[in-house]
Amino acid sequence: MMRKAWLMMLPVMAAGCTTMAEPPAPAGPCVISQELQMRYAGVKFRERLRSEIERTAHARTSRVLHRGDAATMDFRPDRLNIVLDDGNQIEGLRCG
């Protein structure tokens, strides 16, 4: 009886060991639509949102900037800038 129960649980246990394929890396260049701006404007920024926003904007990389932060002026078309206000809410998204 125990052996039957063990055999029935085997597919369930094996399914827990599989991993999901990593989504393909965005190819760039970064593209920010009005819809994307509106979706995230005023949203409290959490690090787990970063990859979702990067993927949606087709950006290869991103950086988080607070209002008044110093930042390099080099333009990188595949980079997303996530601009936060003092309350850590997303104030805007920019490419570059």
Image: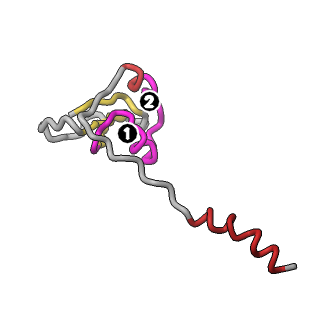
| Mark 1 or 2: the one toward you | 1
Nearest the eye: 31 or 23: 23
Pick whichever of labels 1 and 2 is earlier in the sequence. Answer: 2
Residue denoted by label 2:
40
Residue at 34 percent across and 33 percent down: it is 57
Callout 1 amino acid: Arg
Nearest the eye: 18 or 50: 18
**Rendering coords of residue 38 (x, y %):** 43, 22
Residue at 29 percent across and 39 percent down: it is 59
Magenta range: 38-61
**Rendering coords of residue 96 (x, y %):** 20, 34
Residue 55, numbered circle? 1
Image quadrant where one finds the N terminus:
bottom right
**Classed neighbour count for the residue bearing mark 2: other residues with Cα under 10 Å, few (<14), some (14–19), many (≥20):** some
**Location of residue 68 (image quadrant):** top left
Residue at 45 percent across and 47 percent down: it is 48
**Rendering coords of residue 95 (x, y %):** 25, 31
Nearest the eye: 30 or 15: 15
Q: CA distance from mark 1 to mark 2?
A: 13 Å
